[in-house]
Amino acid sequence: MNRIIAFIFLVLFMQGCSSFEVVTTKSIPVEKVIYIKGEAQNSLFVKANNWMVNNFKNAKSVVQFTDKESGNVSGRYLLSMVMPASDYAPASYAYATINIKVKDGAAKISITPESFVYVKNNMLTYYTEEQSQKDVNSLIDSFSTSIKIAEDNNW
């Protein structure tokens, strides 16, 4: 009887394991140009830099380069932990590179999620490609909203 029960558990376990699939995501940039009539490059640069600082709340997210003259701001952003550390492997994370360019009347944001590996249908996988795409689109929407807000200098 014990052998039959053990065999049933083994078969069920093997069926569950067979549905695991290792997925490597593609690194495809997502871009958006936002037009803001009448805004100077200097003002848009300050807004872009402030947006980066406000969104890069984790110590693993860093603004890597800023150049006010050319209107460029770029950084590496932590999207999420993909899988936690275990006895067999270190934790893995998903990052994205964010590049913002501004000029008089326009801002362009480009977010390129770095390729990462995860295991589909695994309870230890915290983050997937679909979640990455949602987060990238959310960041672009957040930037688009933030860059259009008029600054209140009356304080």
Image: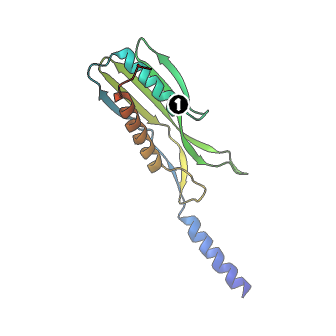
Residue at (55, 54) in percent of width and height: 119
Question: Residue placed farthest to the bottom in the image?
Answer: 1
| 112 up-or-down from 66: above or below | below
Classed neighbour count for the residue bearing mark 1: other residues with Cα under 10 Å, few (<14), some (14–19), many (≥20): many
Question: Residue placed farthest to the front in the image?
Answer: 155
Task: Say which residue label 1 marks.
Answer: 76
47 lies left or right of 13 = left
| Foreground pick, 45 / 113 | 45
The percent coordinates of residue 15 (x first, y second) are: 56, 71
> How many numbered discs?
1
8 lies left or right of 69 = right
The percent coordinates of residue 124 (x first, y second) are: 61, 56
Element on which disc 1 rests: strand
| Foreground pick, 42 / 130 | 42
Residue at (66, 79) in percent of width and height: 7
| Foreground pick, 29 / 151 | 151
Specify the quadrant that holds the N terminus: bottom right
The percent coordinates of residue 109 (x first, y second) are: 38, 29
Amino acid type at image mark 1: Arg
Residue at (65, 76) in percent of width and height: 9
What colour scheme does the image use? rainbow
Q: Quadrant of residue 45?
A: top left
Specify the quadrant that holds the C terminus: top left
The percent coordinates of residue 130 (x first, y second) are: 44, 50
